[in-house]
Image (tube, coloured by chain):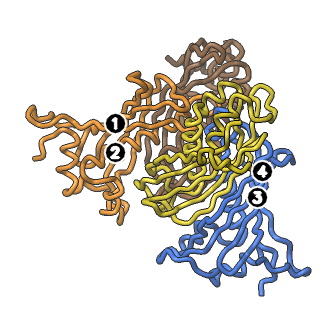
Chain colours: A brown, B orange, C blue, D yellow
Amino acid sequence: MRERADPAAPEPVTSTTEVEVRYAETDQMGVVHHANYVVWFEIARTRLCAESGFHYGEIERLGYFLMVTGVEVSYRRAARYGDRVAVACRLERLGSRGLRFGYEATRDGELLVRGATDHVWVERESGRTCRLPERFAGPFRRLAGLSEG
Amino acid sequence: MRERADPAAPEPVTSTTEVEVRYAETDQMGVVHHANYVVWFEIARTRLCAESGFHYGEIERLGYFLMVTGVEVSYRRAARYGDRVAVACRLERLGSRGLRFGYEATRDGELLVRGATDHVWVERESGRTCRLPERFAGPFRRLAGLSEG
Amino acid sequence: MRERADPAAPEPVTSTTEVEVRYAETDQMGVVHHANYVVWFEIARTRLCAESGFHYGEIERLGYFLMVTGVEVSYRRAARYGDRVAVACRLERLGSRGLRFGYEATRDGELLVRGATDHVWVERESGRTCRLPERFAGPFRRLAGLSEG
Amino acid sequence: MRERADPAAPEPVTSTTEVEVRYAETDQMGVVHHANYVVWFEIARTRLCAESGFHYGEIERLGYFLMVTGVEVSYRRAARYGDRVAVACRLERLGSRGLRFGYEATRDGELLVRGATDHVWVERESGRTCRLPERFAGPFRRLAGLSEG
């Protein structure tokens, strides 16, 4: 369950990344193949994580994975080759063992796709799920707009 | 809403496709990148559609798209390079304007990933959504395990 | 055969695009999978073509494809997740029916990968190869650093 | 330099893998995006290596990579969604430190694409290139159609 944000606490951080549609990302329908949005979400998640002070590559080097346990995508409009798509990401829920990111992809302010991904913390060495590691607790609470306590 | 299958009607058709994990499908975690399951679902959906008598390529040539409007994936275990993964697909819901496919990816009988995709019929020419085209009604009702009426 | 550039003519245009390595582009070796450089070349080519005044999407809308007939890649060093890679592209040869682009991918000035792609002009309608269309001749000659005559 | 095959030695082994074109592999030209052939070559190479008695995954587990240093592809005809493409691979050259595989992708016997990849042996631990490891020498000489001496 997400804790209620302290009214004095900062808002959840939203990080927005611009993606320019690659030709290789289109399919024979003439639009971006639907699986690519899952990749774009990951780019936006990387950017958001970096704002915690830990690039996701650094999180891995420190011995942890944020393993994906679920993906949901809802498609409204299609992006096309050459489009510039803004992908916004925020940390929607921060639990003791897992977290959930939410995403919106827009083009010139028009919603294209909305989605979410669920993750659990995994220790790289053992391959086992674990609790939110101490060193990431403060930074991720800030991302979620929670007081750091 | 899905209609109740007539007890005398055939069961929903389940089509199972074997995928051998490609090296290019792995990521630096050492497992299959999570976006690839969405592509595997599509392979299994292609195989299932072909059992309706219409390869999906034929559906497009006849002027229709089955546009993806939603994707859900739930990950249990990771597949690895060289694994042979069985991806089962069936038509879970057949409505007047849309349909939903369900998927299970297993390795040696062990569940790896479960998912679903939602689709609407779109006329290729106009780009507009439309009702289930007459010519596909019987074949898709059979896939769904519904009486053909 | 490439014509000798007129000493008074402008130099070939080099367009450089920055790519930030996506997690999905890595493989289990822990580096960018080698096929992705072919995709990055295409991004850089799109950027270079846009400098001709015609985005490649516009070229297609006007009824032509620049179909790929050959790819060569030579790998020196690997890119990794999170790296910022500069991909430079220039038009190395402009013939009456085909052309060749050259590429260099570098990270902080260090060469990672070098490559080239060959293309022919194809009429979209007929699917047949054709001569360099008149309307693109001037712009592409400028890209190649040739006098526009 | 490739050694001349002993007339009494077996021919080079050719391994052929069938690939069914995935929708996600097409692009807005309506054909398979050209980068995918590089992935298909890798599938065929995996299959050929397995015939040496060592699946490539096993080679990695034993501490070695066959790192790609070069790729060449020459495109004749395009594959389309649903096509069944046969990708043949053989070991064209086996040197003391590197090797070269050759590929042909055909559809119903018609040549689509031809290509080659160059590789060097790399020790996983050190990341350094190395000589053909002793344990793989015999098996790879057999693949290349060389006497095992």
> Are both tags, 2 and 1, on one chain?
yes
Quadrant, the C terminus of chain C: bottom right
| Residue in the foreground of this view, choosing between A80 and B57 | B57
| Residue in the foreground of this view, choosing between B43 and B129 | B43
Q: Where is residue B106, by image quadrant?
A: top left
Three-letter residue code for mark 2? Arg
Identify which residue is drawn at 57% across, 53% down. Answer: D37
* Mark 4 and mark 1: Cα distance apart in space: 46 Å
Q: Chain of mark 3?
A: C
Three-letter residue code for mark 3? Tyr
Q: Which residue is mark 3?
A: C103
> Are both tags, 4 and 1, on one chain?
no
Three-letter residue code for mark 1? Thr
Identify which residue is drawn at 52% across, 77% down. Answer: C128
Q: Where is residue C115, by image quadrant?
A: bottom right
Q: Which residue is mark 1?
A: B16
Identify which residue is drawn at 55% across, 37% down. Answer: D51
* Mark 1 and mark 3: Cα distance apart in space: 42 Å
Per the image, label 3 sits on a secondary structure element best described as: strand
Q: Which residue is mark 4?
A: D1
| Circle 1 Cα neighbour tier, 10 Å, few/some/many (<14 / 14–19 / ≥20) | many
Q: Which residue is mark 2?
A: B47
Per the image, label 4 sits on a secondary structure element best described as: loop
Q: Chain of mark 4?
A: D
